[in-house]
Image (spheres, coloured by chain):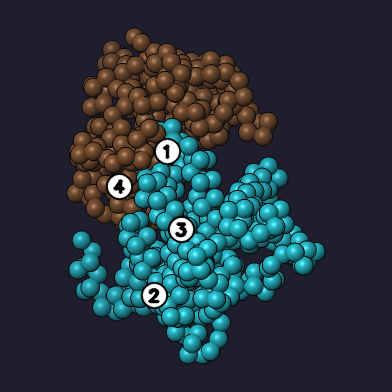
Amino acid sequence: MKTAIETHNLTVAYNRRPVLWDIDFQVPEGQLIGVLGPNGSGKTTLLKSVMGLVQPSSGYVRLFGQSLDEVRSRISYVPQRESVDWNFPISVREVALMGRYRKDKLLGRLSREDHRLADEALEKVGMLPFADRQIAQLSGGQQQRVFVARALAQQADLYLMDEPFAGVDAASEEAILTLLQDMKQAGKTVLIVHHDLHTAHQFFDWMVLLNTRLIKCGPTPAVFTTEYLRQAYGGQLTILSQVADLVKARDFPVRERSFKDQPK
Amino acid sequence: MNAFWIILTGALVATSCGLLGTFLILRKMAMVGDAISHAVLPGIVIAYLLSESRDVLPMLIGAAALGVLTTFMIEFLYQKARLQIDASIGITFTWLFAMGIILISLYAGQVDLDQDCVLYGEIAYVPLDLWITESGRSMGPRPVWILGGVLLLILLLIIVGYRGLKITTFNPEYAAAVGISTVFWHYLLMSAVSVTTVVAFESVGAILVVAFLIVPPATAYLLTEKLQQMLLLTVGLGLLTAVSGYYLAVWIDGSVAGAMAVTSGVFLLLAVLFSPSTGVLTQRFRSRYPLRVTETGK
């Protein structure tokens, strides 16, 4: 498997307080990868440093074995929904069209192909019927789908999504999940910052478990264990007990078999 | 003919300021526009002193430099000194404006600027400031030509740079991720605001500049849900304000700049009350006759 993202000794500090410390990992192409960790563990910062939006104190990031500037057109970014003012006077279609904006052709006109790709992306997330609405008139989940559509319109190979499932209704979650599977089928790599442990092990093939330091990176079964989760979530007892339940739940089929073997 | 020149001056200022103000208020930087419009004063004075003339070019360079310095100072106080953003703005522009006032009072003999004029301008004198060519032909008021030139530059900036301004205003993080320089567009917009302010300043004064930067775009914001419409509506409102403000001033025999600022406020009040989506009275009417809601719901 080829490597989509690799970081080396990546350290990021805000006001001399380290948010990420000496992060070294590699994730393969064509997988759905979850970035997990407790609040303030540096998940969003990791995404932003991969995207070049925050300057690391040390270390570096390679994408498809190259630097960000060499492959920028192959990378697409979905920021947190809170990062914009949803009362902005702009329609759903205009947001999707921003996925076609390029640094070097910002001044020229958008082509018919650009418009087609934007509409196609809206269609994929089920938002085409809302294309002419102002974004303020959408629900939180619909707004998130518009953000995903904008990233799709960019026709990238690697997608970095920051909390796409936060505050999202069931229909939107379903729509995004289906889309993620389609993207995986098409050989795309998707890295997702996610906060909900309950759903994480169903969503992702790979996991990057963080708590300022890298706890573990690898295929989900190897990472999603009580031991590593305990290391990541530390003394947060309520979460820990949930984690124990979750790991049990994941192991359930195995236990069921062993139940059968036992005499009643 | 005087009425025509005065209204035209007001309309040119309103259009230039309104177009830039639209992006300022969407960036939540309306008060930065206010700050720049005051803080360019020392730049103008220094430009006067250095060039010893009232040529437009040194004035524009001085103003643009101070405008950029203003945003720089605000950013510095906010990011590095960790003050609140509104405090940073307040400190920066009062300080720079006061520096300008000191410079004017120190070099009163050499600087052809009056302290009252700085605040209130004197749009009524615009028709007197004629541009007379070397052959002795009168080309009309000088400020109208300068303001017209600036408006052309701003139109060029907004038409050519529309998408750059839009994306860096709506979602700067995403723009940066695509590789678009948010810093470049930020300073481009701020320089445009500085240049417009300084040119408008002389004829209409700092207060009306701020009013035109903020009030018509804010009114348009309440009335529309599309950026392009907001820009067009802002221009329309600016023109309407210039005309009605002038006739209000004639009627009450008062300050033209003051009357224009007041009428822009009246239009804003009407929008607050009757805007189709957010109007205070519109919503009351809807809640009393709820059937109308279903009509507009889909």
> Which corner quadrant holds the C terminus of chain B?
bottom left
Instruction: Identify residue for label 2.
Output: B240
Instruction: Identify residue for label 3.
Output: B149
User: What colour do you see for chain A?
Assistant: brown
Q: Nearer the viewer, mark 3 or mark 1?
A: 3
Instruction: Identify residue for label 1.
Output: B174
- Which secondary structure, mark 4? helix
- The Cα atoms of the two marked residues, 4 and 1, are separated by 14 Å
Location of residue B22 with respect to B239 vertically, above or below: above
Q: Residue at x 46, y 18 (%)?
A: A67
Tell which subunit mark 3 falls on: B
* Badge 4 amino acid: Glu
- Which secondary structure, mark 3? helix
* Badge 2 amino acid: Leu
Residue A228 numbered tag: none
User: What colour do you see for chain B?
Assistant: cyan
* A76 and A27: which is toward the camera: A76
